[in-house]
Amino acid sequence: MIATKQMDVRANIKKYFDMAFNGEPVIVSRKENKNVVIISETEYNELAKAKKNAEYLAKLNRADEQIRNGHVITKTMDELLVMEDSL
């Protein structure tokens, strides 16, 4: 990981984009600590996928907790069919 200033990125944008594309994240420091990170699209997609997976696992954990605590509603197949017919 490399850190640089916003002015340097402007002056050498291709260099920093190439670094990010080749797997080297680039931290761009900005005023008031509003820093940003340049990463490749591939790395971004991997991070987004990991975030979605973590959110999904958290939902599964909450559902498992609800089941263990008895917070479930049980329906028979006949009840479900009646519900379907009423739609």
Image (tube, grey):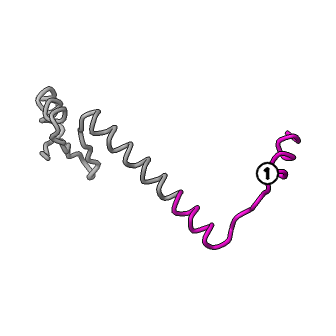
Instruction: In this rendered view, identify the residue nearer to me: 85 or 36.
Output: 85
Drawn side of residue 71 relative to residue 80, left or right: left
What is the x, y in percent for residue 85? 87, 40
Most extreme residue toward the front is: 77
Instruction: In this rendered view, identify the residue nearer to me: 28 or 40.
Output: 40
Taking the spot 20% from the left edge, 46% from the top edge, the residue there is 29
Drawn side of residue 46 relative to residue 85, left or right: left
What is the x, y in percent for residue 22? 15, 34
Queried whether the magenta region covers residue 71, the answer comes back as yes
Compared with residue 75, is residue 31 higher up or lower down, i.e. above or below? above
In the rendered view of the protein, which quadrant contains the C terminus?
top right
Q: Which residues are magenta?
A: 60-87
Drawn side of residue 14 relative to residue 75, left or right: left
Taking the spot 24% from the left edge, 48% from the top edge, the residue there is 31
Q: Which residue is mark 1?
A: 77
Report the label total.
1
What is the x, y in percent for residue 23? 17, 38
Quadrant location of residue 16? Answer: top left
Quadrant location of residue 36? Answer: top left
The secondary structure that most of the magenta stretch takes on is helix
Queried whether the magenta region covers residue 5, the answer comes back as no
Amino acid type at image mark 1:
Met
Taking the spot 80% from the left edge, 49% from the top edge, the residue there is 80
Taking the spot 19% from the left edge, 45% from the top edge, the residue there is 27
Most extreme residue toward the bottom is: 69
What element does badge 1 sit on?
A: helix
Q: Dot 1: within a 10 Å radius of its alpha carbon, few (fewer than 14), some, or many (20 or more) residues?
A: few
Most extreme residue toward the top is: 14
Instruction: In this rendered view, identify the residue nearer to me: 70 or 30.
Output: 70
